[in-house]
Image (cartoon, rainbow, N blue to C red):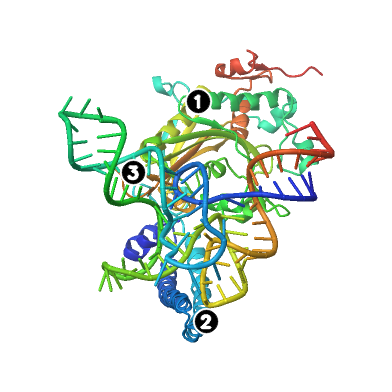
RNA sequence: GGAGGGAUGGCAGAGCGGACGAAUGCACUGGUCUUGAAAACCAGCGUGGUGAAAGCCACCGAGGGUUCGAAUCCCUCUCCCUCCGCCA
């Protein structure tokens, strides 16, 4: 969440920044008004509380000298004030909760550099790459045999069995099989290995507490998007960002330890409630997919470099896989609620003839760290300071899998895979069409 | 799942109804001493809220309760440890 103090001291600035992403001024005004009420109530309550405490001490003193009459009179007075204090406390707490719940759904302030605009049409393509573009090769053209959607290729080569996935878990739960499953596993290994020079590998829990999803901003606002196991009050994680951001929740870190960087591959679960009926075929939009995430806790000064590092690593993987991609600098209206600045990486997938989002690399400023209460003690001394968080996918495999299978398809129906996967596939880089 | 024990400041650990935000030790920071360091000695050393400030308030795993007054008593929950059962 954004800093309540900032809202108080610079309401116009906050309102203007949020207007860039379409948040009405009334939301800020409501917080300011309610916060003023809350503080007034709190002051009344605390004054009563101080009085009760002071009277109680006098009761103790009176009893010590044996003056029972005075003690009893003081106790009576204190009891009265205590009742009033309890009532005031409840009132203050209720309003405090209201302030907090308003604050929790207000999105982050977009970075100044984030492009203007309210819809995805306003996103800015900042870069485009294809194999050979570095040395001046022209834009790639795709042959007819590459214009086959991955669900068809997957079925022909027995790599993907969406029907059986649906039998087991319902539609949009993919089932990879045979070489298709091996390919998926190889991609995860490739990526995890690629980041081990600087990022500690984590294998976090797949389910998480409400608190954990609140820290990243996935709750309370987007509860419809996540799977909930009511009996145990646990949520299925929508991304490894969720557990990783809570790794140091409530802790005070040492500045010397920053940046703290993690990488993790997890299954990611999404209900896709707002997209029902869209992209129902194949792997374009699924309820469960594997993804390798990169994450870092950093200082404000380190944030920019850390953000770019993740972007570069995601790009590096796409290049090594030989997939055409582009980078989008998301406009204010399209940036996720918790982020200040986001770059999306989209891969071109010829069989479906679409750009597929395979990574979202974001800088959250201190928005998530404030929710998660992750701070660091400055090396120079002084009070703890909120960390910044950055994260990004490197990469989301379902769509990469689709793009690889479509891009690599040959005229004879077989699929050729990039050389970089050789060590993970025991050198077998061709998926042949099964006979009969 | 059953029985028992526990959770206090960065760490260790006392306190178990009355000035406790909390003894003590270690760690850390500053100072004295020293050519320098160590040792010794002195001082400081949690977080947050609110307020112009003085101050006031909150926090002893979490939440509720009893009481004039709760770290201390009661209830619920979470987590950790030991033993038993079950289990990949």
Q: Quadrant of residue A136?
A: top left
Secondary structure, mark 3, is: loop
Is disc 3 surrounded by few (<14), some (14 to 19) or many (20+) residues within 10 Å? some
Provide the chain ID for the residue under circle 3: A
Secondary structure, mark 1, is: loop
The mark nearer the N terminus, 1 or 2, is: 2
The residue that mark 1 highlights is: A196
Q: Is residue A180 left or right of residue A297?
A: right
Whole-percent x and y of residue A29? Answer: 41, 70
The mark nearer the N terminus, 2 or 3, is: 2
Compute the Cα span from label 2 to label 3: 45 Å
- Any part of residue A220 in sight: no
| In front: label 1 or label 2 | 2
| In front: label 2 or label 3 | 2
The mark nearer the N terminus, 3 or 1, is: 1
The residue that mark 2 highlights is: A79
Q: Residue at x 44, y 59 (%)?
A: A22
| In front: label 3 or label 1 | 3
């Amino acid at each position: 969440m954004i800093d309540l103090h900032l809202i108080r001291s610079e309401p116009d600035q906050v309102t203007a920044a949020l207007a860039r992403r379409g948040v009405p001024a009334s939301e800020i005004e409501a917080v300011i008004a309610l916060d003023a009420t809350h503080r007034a109530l709190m002051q009344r309550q605390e004054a009563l509380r101080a009085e009760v405490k002071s009277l109680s001490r006098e009761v103790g003193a009176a009893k010590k000298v044996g003056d029972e009459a005075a003690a009893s009179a003081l106790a009576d007075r204190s009891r009265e004030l205590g009742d009033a204090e309890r009532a005031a406390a409840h009132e203050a707490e209720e309003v405090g909760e209201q302030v907090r719940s308003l604050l929790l759904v207000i999105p982050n302030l977009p970075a100044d550099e984030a492009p203007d605009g309210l819809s995805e049409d306003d996103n800015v393509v900042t870069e485009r790459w294809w194999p050979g573009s570095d040395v001046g090769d022209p834009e790639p053209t795709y042959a007819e045999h590459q214009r086959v959607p991955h669900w068809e290729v997957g079925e022909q080569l027995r790599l993907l069995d969406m029907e059986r996935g649906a039998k087991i878990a319902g539609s949009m739960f993919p089932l990879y099989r045979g070489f298709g499953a091996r390919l998926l596993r190889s991609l995860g290994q490739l990526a995890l290995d690629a980041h081990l020079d600087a990022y500690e590998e984590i294998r976090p829990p797949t389910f998480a507490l409400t608190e954990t999803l609140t820290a990243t901003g996935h709750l309370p606002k987007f509860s419809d998007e996540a799977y909930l196991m009511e009996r145990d009050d646990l949520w299925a994680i929508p991304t490894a960002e969720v557990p990783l951001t809570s790794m140091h929740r409530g802790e005070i870190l040492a500045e010397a330890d920053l940046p703290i960087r993690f990488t993790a591959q997890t299954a990611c679960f999404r209900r896709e409630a707002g997209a029902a009926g869209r992209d129902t075929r194949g792997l374009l939009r699924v309820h469960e997919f594997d993804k390798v995430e990169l994450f870092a806790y950093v200082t404000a000064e380190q944030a920019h470099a850390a953000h770019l590092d993740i972007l570069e690593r995601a790009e590096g993987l796409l290049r090594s896989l030989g997939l055409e991609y582009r980078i989008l600098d998301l406009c204010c209206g399209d940036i996720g609620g918790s982020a200040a600045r986001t770059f999306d990486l989209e891969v071109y997938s010829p069989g479906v003839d679409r750009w597929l989002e395979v990574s979202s690399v974001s800088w959250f400023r201190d928005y998530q760290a404030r929710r998660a209460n992750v701070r660091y003690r400055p090396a120079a001394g002084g009070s703890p300071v909120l960390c910044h968080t950055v994260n990004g996918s490197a990469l989301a495999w379902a769509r990469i899998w689709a793009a690889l299978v479509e891009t690599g398809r040959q005229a004879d129906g077989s699929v050729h895979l990039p050389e970089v996967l050789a060590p993970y596939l025991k050198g077998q880089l061709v998926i042949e069409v099964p006979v009969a």
